[in-house]
RNA sequence: GGGCCUAUGGCGCAGCAUGGAUAGCGUGUUGGACUUCUAAUCCAAAAGUCAUGGGAUCGAAGCCCAUUGGGCCCA
């Protein structure tokens, strides 16, 4: 039990008081209080003011009086505040014990929102023709963090990565390789994905502008891609799988792993589209247009003012949304699965096995990656398209929240950073563009961060051996990058600045990791194994109680974050924890007090903090080093 | 022309879902704290018409409507 226990106790008692007063249907809140207003607050008096025709304060007076008549073990005092709020003060001796012993359990912070149901999270889904840039990293980190949070909330999570290996962008680099003389070997020291993106793709699209005859070659290449047996398709497969492997290396390095890779080329060749098309017709979800500008087309009717969306053109070809519909249906398990499965050639770090779909026969057992619910992480520029799919899937499953588009705003480049890449934006931020070569690769940001953190770590710990420095710097760099991508709301644009993003102070991952390192150091120096068999009443300093309280909020934060699919809730929680601990660290001594019992109690608190911040950071995919 | 997102101290953000107390945090600025369990830290000060206008409400940063600035999508 955690801080939730006192909230539940109060809620129960307030409900009893309400029925005593013969009042029903009041949905009051019981929440952790703001500092200086006790431990828990309720707005119940404001809501009753109208019904009982009394002032909120009068009601609070009555409530606080009545409250004492009901059984309460975790509340020590109820106070009616002149503002009208009803404030509760906790019995900290009991609450300390509850929270600190709970925090030692493996499942601390878990909530049961999912009831062990299966949810599909699709993220990453980058065209396999270039290296991942900082904008893709936002997608990947959001997707991975959400997956971790949902797992903590008792969902079984299937993480998918959709590989668009048959689109225009892939065709473009194929044109570069086959018609513009690009070698298949990158220059010495350059990763293949960087080479494809930085050199082949950018220069090929440049050439289109100069040489219009390339346009036909491009179109033909794209067409040939759709036919799996073509030489072009085989060549594409060779190139894209090399790029994909490099992309995956970047993800793995950031602690991101997947369950299954889905290939667009296979979805096209699988015949899924034909089957879903028939089903759509059967269910009257699409209509054949006999007149107007869409005459001869199959369309999805727009709702309200929305325009109709063409699905199949009058010439019989499917529009690009026709690739997304079967995939969405497959993710929800609405169709009989056309795929076989095989393991990815390289093992990814961690415990997940990475599978991939195939249309060939395999010896591996059939897998099932479909879910009761699907979350697709794609930036909000795709909102319109995603909305159509959401509506369609809702009708298919006759349930409204089975397919969720989790959108987020883009990452743009600051004027300074754009300038270093050779574009003068006159002080404005700039949209990244793969075609124009205007982006910052994720690997380079990681390298910059790592060089800086190695330098810092060496300065602080001359005694550390190189491999430990390397490991610590890696954890800090990954943490910094991930935290920057997650700490603000999804609907805020992130303006990426190469210089500012390297900051390691303030509201950053290193700040939080440092608090953990301090805690680890106290425990190490104590020479003891922290125990929960201590006197909890010795933890009475307001700073200590504040820290216990924040620790006890873990599960409430996980629930909030999972319900709202809002990863930043956890990043803020980590920050709050670190602030509370740093304040404790500066003001409350643990070691060398000459009071063994007090030292043991405080060690218990330090240990609770340490494992809680570890678990919370783990939800963000961030490791916490013991020394930094 | 239609749609989506956004506006909070100089800068970057939280709070808005579920209206109620003293609008928080980081950074920057100014000043202070390392012989101490690690200063990637802490403490303090200055800095806010919560974009503008209206509405409903006993009560709005939050809800509704309109307007303006910024970003994006579609045509």
Image (tube, coloured by chain):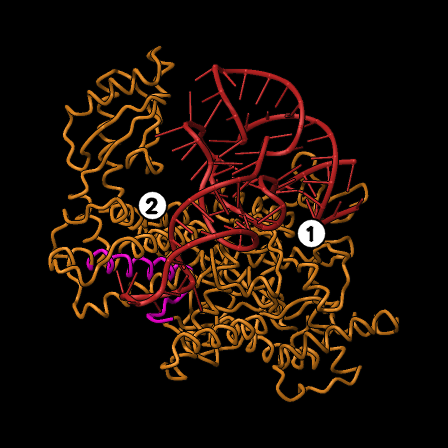
Chain colours: A orange, B red
Q: Are marks 1 and 2 in contact (CB under 8 Å)?
A: no
* Category of crowding for the residue at label 1, using alpha-carbon neighbours closer than 10 angstroms: few (below 14), some (14–19), many (at least 20): many
Quadrant holding the C terminus of chain A: bottom left
Q: Where does residue A377 sit, x and y in percent of width and height?
A: 54, 56
Left-right relation of B17 to A516: right
Q: Where does residue A269 sit, x and y in percent of width and height?
A: 62, 68
In the rendered view, would you say A227 is above or below B22?
below
Q: Residue at x 61, y 62 (%)?
A: A135
Residue furthest top in the image: A53
Q: Chain of mark 2?
A: A
Q: In this orientation, which residue lies closer to the viewer: A118 or A133?
A: A133
Number of on-image labels: 2
The residue wearing badge 2 is A556
In the rendered view, would you say A229 is above or below A267?
below
In terms of sequence position, does the residue under pointer 1 or pointer 2 come before the other? 1
**Residue A319 image-quadrant placement:** bottom right
Look at the numbered disc 1 and give the secondary structure of its residue.
Answer: strand
The residue wearing badge 1 is A311
Please name the predominant secondary structure of the magenta segment in the image.
Answer: helix
In the rendered view, would you say A442 is above or below A603?
below
Q: Where does residue A438 sit, x and y in percent of width and height?
A: 71, 66
Q: Chain of mark 1?
A: A
Highlighted magenta segment, given as a residue range: A603-628
């Amino acid at each position: 039990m955690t801080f939730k226990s006192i909230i539940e106790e109060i809620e129960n008692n307030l409900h009893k008081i309400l029925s005593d007063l013969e009042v029903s249907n009041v949905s009051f809140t019981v929440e952790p209080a703001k500092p200086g207003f006790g431990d828990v607050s309720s707005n119940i008096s404001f809501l009753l003011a109208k019904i009982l025709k009394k002032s909120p304060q009068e009601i609070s007076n009555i409530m606080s009086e009545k409250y004492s008549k009901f059984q309460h073990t975790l509340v020590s005092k109820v106070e009616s505040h002149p503002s009208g709020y009803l404030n509760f003060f906790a019995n900290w001796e009991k609450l300390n014990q509850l929270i600190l012993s709970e925090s030692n359990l493996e499942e601390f912070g878990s909530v049961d929102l999912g009831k062990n149901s299966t949810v599909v999270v699709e993220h990453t889904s980058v065209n396999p023709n270039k290296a991942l840039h900082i904008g893709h990293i936002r997608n990947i980190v959001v997707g991975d963090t959400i997956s971790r949070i949902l797992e903590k909330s008792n969902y079984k999570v299937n993480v998918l990565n959709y590989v668009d290996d048959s689109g225009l962008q892939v065709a473009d680099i194929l044109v570069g390789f086959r018609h513009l003389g690009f070698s298949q070997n990158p220059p010495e020291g350059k990763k293949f994905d960087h080479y494809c993106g930085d050199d082949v793709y950018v220069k090929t699209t440049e050439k289109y502008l100069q040489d219009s005859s390339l346009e036909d070659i491009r179109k033909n290449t794209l067409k040939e891609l759709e036919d799996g047996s073509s030489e072009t398709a085989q060549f594409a497969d060779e190139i894209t799988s090399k790029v994909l492997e490099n992309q995956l290396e970047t993800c793995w390095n950031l602690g991101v792993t997947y369950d299954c890779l889905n290939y667009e080329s296979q979805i096209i060749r699988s015949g899924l589209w034909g089957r879903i098309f028939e089903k759509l017709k059967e269910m009257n979800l699409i209509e054949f247009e006999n007149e107007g500008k869409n005459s001869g087309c199959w369309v999805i009717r727009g709702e309200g003012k929305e325009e109709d969306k063409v699905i199949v053109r009058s010439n019989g070809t499917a529009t690009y949304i026709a690739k997304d519909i079967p995939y969405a249906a497959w993710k929800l398990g609405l169709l009989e699965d056309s795929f076989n499965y095989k393991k990815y050639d390289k093992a990814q770090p961690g415990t997940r096995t990475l599978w991939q779909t195939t249309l060939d026969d395999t010896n591996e057992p059939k897998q099932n990656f479909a879910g009761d619910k699907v979350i697709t992480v794609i930036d909000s520029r795709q909102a319109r398209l995603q909305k159509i799919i959401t509506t369609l899937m809702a009708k298919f499953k006759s349930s409204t929240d089975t397919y969720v588009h989790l959108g987020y705003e883009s990452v743009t480049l600051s004027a300074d950073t754009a300038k270093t890449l050779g574009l003068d934006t006159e002080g404005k931020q700039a949209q990244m563009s793969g075609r124009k070569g205007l982006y910052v690769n994720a690997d380079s940001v990681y390298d910059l961060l790592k060089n800086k953190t190695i330098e810092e770590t060496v300065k602080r710990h001359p005694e550390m051996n190189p491999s430990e420095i390397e490991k610590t710097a890696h954890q800090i760099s990954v943490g910094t990058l991930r935290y920057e991508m997650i700490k603000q709301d999804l609907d805020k644009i992130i303006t990426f600045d190469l210089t500012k993003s390297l900051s390691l102070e303030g509201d950053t991952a290193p700040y939080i990791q440092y608090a953990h390192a301090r805690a680890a150091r106290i425990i190490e120096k104590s020479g003891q194994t922290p125990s929960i068999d201590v006197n909890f009443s010795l933890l009475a300093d307001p700073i200590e109680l504040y820290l216990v309280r924040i620790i006890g909020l873990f599960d409430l934060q996980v629930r909030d974050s999972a319900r709202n699919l809002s990863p930043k809730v956890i990043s803020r929680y980590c920050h709050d924890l670190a602030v509370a601990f740093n304040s404790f660290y500066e003001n409350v001594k643990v070691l060398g007090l000459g009071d063994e019992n007090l030292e043991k109690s405080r060690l218990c608190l330090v240990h609770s903090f340490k494992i809680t911040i570890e678990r919370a950071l783990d939800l963000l995919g961030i490791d916490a080093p013991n020394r930094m």
